Amino acid sequence: MKTLFSLLLTCSVLLGHAQQQPVNDTVTPIATIEHKMVGNQVQFNANAPALNQIAGAPKAFYTNYWEFGDGTYSKENTPSKSYKKAGEYEVKLWATNNYDTGKPPTTRPKKIKVDNADNTISEEASMDDGIDLQRNREPIPQEEIVVIFKYKNKKDYATNGKLMLFYNETVYNDANFEITDTRTYHGETKQDNNDFVYTSKTENNTYYASAETQSLRAYFTPQDSTERQNLPLTLAEAKANYKNSSQLSFNNMQPNEERNVFYTLKTTPEMLKDTSAIISVRGVYIPDNNYDNHNVKDMEMEIVTSHDPNKMSSNSTFLNYRLVRFKKPKFKIRFQNNGEGPASTIRLETDIPDMFDKASIEVLDMYPKVKICPKHNVQYSCLDTTYTAKQAIFTFKNIYLPGSEQKNVKVYDSTKGFVKYQIKFGKDFHKQKTKSRTAIIFDKNDPIITNYSTTRFLPGISIGAKAGYNSFSDLDNSKSYFVGATISPYKSYKWYWQVELLNSFHTYNGQSTFTNTLDEDTPVGFPYWERTTTTKAYDNIDWELPVLARYNINNYIGLGAGLQGMLSVSEKSEVTATTSYFEDEAGTFPVPNLDPTSSTTSESSSFTNFRTGFLVEATAGFARIGPSVGARYVFNFKENYNYMQFYAIWKF
C-alpha cells in the first residue's frame, strides 16, 4: 500500500511540474491550394492559417507566389490561369506572412487535371530586356526563396544559347545559399561548370582584349541588363565575385519568345545574420552560342528576420577602414502602402550618421520612377531631397501609389516603392559603428519606423615600427637600446589592444663583491690582508613582449597600461677577480713591492631570467596612425629591475 501511495505521489508531482513547463509550439503552419474550374480558366485560392499580428506594425497580410506547372507564374493572391494544353499540372504555392510573428506556412504541391484548354491563348509579353531576375520574397535565415530567371529571344531568328546563375558572394566567408531545385519547362539542360566553352567573336566580328588585362572586381557596381561583348571578362568578373554557379543550355528559342527557369534557394545554417546587409545573385544570358554578345543582370536582396516591406539596408555593413576614404556606401529604403487607398505623398525621414557628408547624397534609383524636384514648386511628380542637422528627407510628391487593401489591386508589388542612394564620408570620421533608420510617412498617417541599418568597420591591422632607449637607474654603467614591431587594430578610435615584440641590446655591470682574507704565510716575512674584488659585466640580448590596453584621448594624445614579459635569449658575462694586498684589514696601507693580481673568466647562457612586470605609458604625436613619441615605465614584480623607456613609433 505504501509503495502504491508513493508511486501515485511521484506521478502527481511530475505531472504538476510538467504542467508548469512552457510548451513550445512545434506545429508548422500549412497553407493549402484550392482551385475551381470556370470555363477554360482555373481559379486559385490559398487557404492559409490565421496571422499573428506584430504589435505596433501595420495590419498583417499574406502575399502569394504561384507556379502553375507549365513554366508560368503569378504573384497575385488569387490568380486565374488558362492553359494551352489539356493534361495534368503540378501547381506550387509559396505564401509569405507580412507583419506576422510566425513562420511562413508550408504548402504541398497540388496536381490538377485540365480538360478545357485553349491553344489559342498567347502569354502576354512582359519583358523589354533580354534578361530579368525576380524573387518571391526577401531571404530570411532557415527559409527558402525562389529566384525566377526570365529570358527573351530578341533576335529575328531561332537561337541556341546558355543561362548562368552566380550566387554566394566571395566577400562573405560562408555560403548564404544552396540550390535545392531547378525547374525547367523548355528542355533546358544542366552543364558542368567546367565545360563552358565560348567563342571570341561578336555579331559584328569585332575582337577585343582578354580578361587578364582588365580588373576583375566589379562587386560594388551592380550589373544591369545592357548587352555586352566581352564574355571572357564577364565570366572572370563573376567568378571573382561569386563562389558558386549553375549553368543551363537551351535550344530552338523562337523570336520574341519568353521563358522562365525557377530556382529554389535554401539558406544555409551559416547564412549572414546581419539584417541590414544587401546580398546579390547575378544572371548571365548568352542568347546565341555563335557569338559572345550577352546580357548581365544583378538582383540585390535584403536579409530580413521577418517579412516587413518597410526596411532600410546597405551594401556596406562591413567596411575596410584603410580603404574607405573614397568609397561611396549605398543605402536602400523600401516601403509599401498598406492602406485602403492610394498615397499621393510619401515622406522618408532618414537618419544620416555624423561620419557621412549629407551634401554628397546622390539618388541612384527610385520607385515610383519620377524626376528630381527643382527648387521651385511644380505640379508634376517628383522626388524632393532636403536636409536637417541629422537627417536627409526624401519626399515623393504628386504620385499615385496604390494601397494593398485597395479594391481591384491584385499585384502587391505595385504597392511597393524604394529609394536607393549613395553618400560619401566626411572629411574627418572615426572608426565607429553607425546606425540609421527611416521614418516612413504616407500622406498624413502616423510614421512607420524601419529597422536600423548598421555600418561596421573591419578591425584591420596596423603594423608599427618602434625604436628607443631603456634607462635602468638601479644598474651601473647601463646602456640599453631596442628595436621592434607592434600590432594593433588599424586607426583605432578610442580603446584598443596592442601587442609588441621588442629586441633589446643591453650592457651593464653587476654589483661588486669584496672578500678580505688574512694570509700569515707570506713571502715578505709578515702577515698581510688579501682583498679580492669581484665584478661582473653583462652583455645581453633580451626579448620584451608587452601586451597593453591603450586609449586615445584625442588624435594626438594616448595612454596605455598592461603587462610585460622579458626573456634573456642570450646572456654573456665576464667575471673579473682582482686581489690587492694590505697591511691592515681596512685596506689603508698597501704592502710595499706587492702589486695587485687579477683573473677573468667568461660565462654564457640562453633563454634565462624570465621577468614579468606591469607598465604604464603615454604618447604624443599622431595617436591613431603615423609617427609619435612616448615614455613608458616598467615595474618588475620580483627583481629590482625597474626601468624607464623612451621611444619613437610609427604606425602604418
Image (spheres, helix red, strand yellow):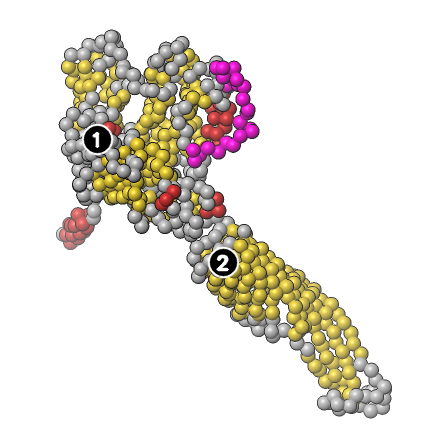
Does dot 2 land on a helix, a strand or a loop?
loop
Judging depth in this view, the residue of 164 and 490 nearest the camera is 490
Examine the rendered structure and indicate whether residue 230 appears above or below residue 99.
above
In the rendering, at what x and y percent does residue 256 appear?
A: 35, 13
Q: Main secondary structure of the magenta part?
A: loop
In the rendering, at what x and y percent does residue 73 appear?
A: 27, 21
Residue in view at x 38 percent, y 32 percent: 280
- Rounded to the nearest angstrom, the CA distance separating label 1 from label 2 is 54 Å
- Report the amino acid beneath label 1: Tyr
Residue 488 falls left or right of residue 134: right
Q: Which residues are magenta?
A: 198-221
- Report the amino acid beneath label 2: Ala
Judging depth in this view, the residue of 459 and 87 nearest the camera is 459
Residue in view at x 84 percent, y 88 percent: 592
Judging depth in this view, the residue of 421 and 298 nearest the camera is 421
Density class for disc 2 (Cα within 10 Å; few <14, some 14-19, many ≥20) is many
Density class for disc 1 (Cα within 10 Å; few <14, some 14-19, many ≥20) is some
Residue in view at x 45 percent, y 56 percent: 496
In the rendering, at what x and y percent does residue 519 appear?
A: 78, 86
Examine the rendered structure and indicate whether residue 564 appears above or below residue 93.
below
On the image, numbered disc 1 is attached to which residue?
400
Across the whole image, how many numbered discs are drawn on residues? Answer: 2
Question: Which picture quadrant has residue 132?
Answer: top left
On the image, numbered disc 2 is attached to which residue?
623
Question: Is 208 included in the stretch rendered in magenta?
Answer: yes
